Amino acid sequence: MKKILFVSNEAARTGAPAIMLGFIKWLSAHHEIESICVLMRDGALREEFELLGRTYTWIPTDLNKPERIHKRLAKVIMNKGQADPGIWLTKIIEREKPDIIYLSTLVLGKYLQQLSKNPNQRIITHVHELLPSLRQLSNDQLVSCQLQYSDAVIACARCVSEMLINTYHLPPSKIKIIPEYIVPEKPLHGGDRSSNSLTPSTNERTLLNKLHQAIDLGIPIFGIGGNPIHRKGFDLFPLLIKECKTQFADTPFLAVWIGCGDGSEPQVALEWDLSHLGMNNEVALIPSVSMPTFRWIVRQFRVLTLLSREDPFPLVVLEAGLMGIPTVCFEDSGAIPEFAAEGQCVSVNYLDIPAFAAAVKRLCLDPAEATKIGEQCRQKVMGDLTLEKVAPLVADVLFNGI
């Protein structure tokens, strides 16, 4: 039985932690392993990790309290010199003596400074980031340090592999490209988009009043889900809405952003922009919601508007693709524009908002084209990008290297 220590930069319900959680579940079901989880920041997924085995959390906090309280507590502890997360992680590794260490992102280098490389332990780093994120969340020295510690590196996309080779001079022989994945809730056929096939959580239905009104009136709905940050193109959202207002002319629409909390700084800033543009009625800002509600909202979209500047392999595209919903994205923003060559999405020139809006309008008002592209994406997801397809590739790297 192999003992594997899984290290996550955080436990938020976001891409890399969710990907790691799914891998642990699959490995536990298909291989004889003992899994230990280390979470370098607390979050909503912590309780799910704890169900899978022994779990260590740096500065656990009350998950019912706002995240800013946790951040403040962590800062106080660090400033007082009461603990160091790198030393804490090193002691766990020394105590547990795992056969394999899986590092879920390439921004963990700052925690590895006290770690002595054990030749009997295989270290695998899974990279979900491109250069801007690495330099915002870490730095080149720490990234290089983590890559040197790693016996093998999994890159989630070709663009990530190219960055590792060209910027950090990582030998191609140490890299394996393995895409991200999704776990289908149930078989979906022909991109069935019936709004009755998923049901939003009861306690979240009051958040969806604008959507229900648009559905009742047959108004086209498009949007995206994700953190309201620069990398995700949140600042481009009002510009897209303004351009759509012009291009849609007299045709009404509703633009949705899922993950923008009420009263948050991004929400206040966007509401200010929308009020000056006179377009509050065309927008629904929805806070982070449960997965059933998230999927129900995405199911109502005619188009997924991926405004990301830098997003190696966003899972929301796979969620939408599974439902037969087409995506519009920017060229050179990650792996998703590669889908366009096979007719599985629509990509436009980088940051070309008028072209983006034109593509959104075309797909919103041409159901035949939207259905064709959405179905191509659905087939891609079901054929290549499910947990059952991807997990064995990761397991092979964990157990056998590259």
Image (spheres, rainbow, N blue to C red):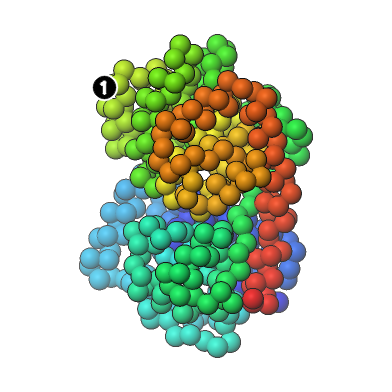
**Residue shown at the point (47%, 50%) measured from the top left:** 332
User: In terms of image quadrants, where is residue 74?
Assistant: bottom left
In this figure, what is the number of numbered marks? 1
Amino acid of disc 1: His
Q: Quadrant of the C terminus?
A: bottom right
392 lies left or right of 350: right
Q: Quadrant of residue 82?
A: bottom left
Q: Is residue 181 left or right of residue 153?
A: right
Residue 395 image-quadrant placement: bottom right
Residue drawn at (32%, 71%), measured in percent from left and top? 83
Q: Is residue 81 visible?
A: yes
Determine if residue 291 is in view: no
Residue 79 position within the rendered picture, expressed as x and y whole percent measured from the top left: 23, 65
Residue where numbered disc 1 is placed: 276
Q: Residues within 10 Å of mark 1 (few under 14, many from 20)?
A: few
- Of residues 256 and 13, the one nearer the viewer is 256
